[in-house]
Image: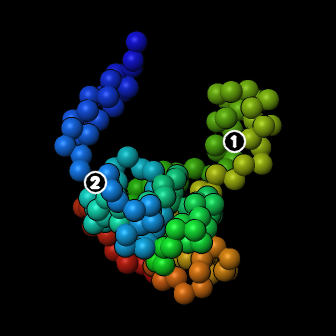
């Protein structure tokens, strides 16, 4: 028996695919850029950032952390021809609400000592200041020259989950 979430996927996808007409898009992003943003459920990157199907790579993770996205960034830049990177973090991010010690304690509480040991060295990359975290990510990209193509245009933004507006911060 499919879960309600699975049923939703099947139902909505049937509607979506019924009049789908963009099956001929090329593999590389048509506008040659990539976006690194947070997995936060309140962000709709395509709608909020003006991304049409086939335009760009959108890499999402907790916090929109470039370090965490590095594998995908290299693939996007080196194999799939992207030339510009937008790093978009956001207000009220969950990453502002905990430290590595906090989440490690939670893992131990929820799952026990063995799980805590298993995950002991994982850096969850939390940050206390969102604008500074954007700047730090841009610095990370500049320092890791192998991650980009050298001439890649990089910029940093903060999306406001209350207003839906983005502002440039770096
Ligand atoms: Zn977030």
Q: Residue furthest top?
A: 1
* The N terminus: image quadrant: top left
Q: Quadrant of residue 3?
A: top left
Pick the residue in front: 68 or 54. 54
Q: Residue furthest left?
A: 19
- Left or right, 140 with reference to 113: left
According to the picture, the residue beneath numbered tag 1 turns out to be 104
Of marks 1 and 2, which one's residue comes earlier in the chain? 2
Please provide percent x and percent y for residue 130.
Answer: 48, 66
Residue at the image point whose x is 43% and y is 72% from the top: 33
Pick the residue in front: 150 or 95. 150
Pick the residue in front: 83 or 91. 83
Please provide percent x and percent y for residue 5.
Answer: 36, 27
Image: 47 above or below 83? above
Question: Which disc number belongs to residue 114?
Answer: none
Q: Quadrant of residue 74?
A: bottom right
- Left or right, 95 with reference to 101: left
Residue at the image point whose x is 69% and y is 53% from the top: 123
According to the picture, the residue beneath numbered tag 2 turns out to be 22
- Determine the secondary structure under disc 1: helix
């Amino acid at each position: 028996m499919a879960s309600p979430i699975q049923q939703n996927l099947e139902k909505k996808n049937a509607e979506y695919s019924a009049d789908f007409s963009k099956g001929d898009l090329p593999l590389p992003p048509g506008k040659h850029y990539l976006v690194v943003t947070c997995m936060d459920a309140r962000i709709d990157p395509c709608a909020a950032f003006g991304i049409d199907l086939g335009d760009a790579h959108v890499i999402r993770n907790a916090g929109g952390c470039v370090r965490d996205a590095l594998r995908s960034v290299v693939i996007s830049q080196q194999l799939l021809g992207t030339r510009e990177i937008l790093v978009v973090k956001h207000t009220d991010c969950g990453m502002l609400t905990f430290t590595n010690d906090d989440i490690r304690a939670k893992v131990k509480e929820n799952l026990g000592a063995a799980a805590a040991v298993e995950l002991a060295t994982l850096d969850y990359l939390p940050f206390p200041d969102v604008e500074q975290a954007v700047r730090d990510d841009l610095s990370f990209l500049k320092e890791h020259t192998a991650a980009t193509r050298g001439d890649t245009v990089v910029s940093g933004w903060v999306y406001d989950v209350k207003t839906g507006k983005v502002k440039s911060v770096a």
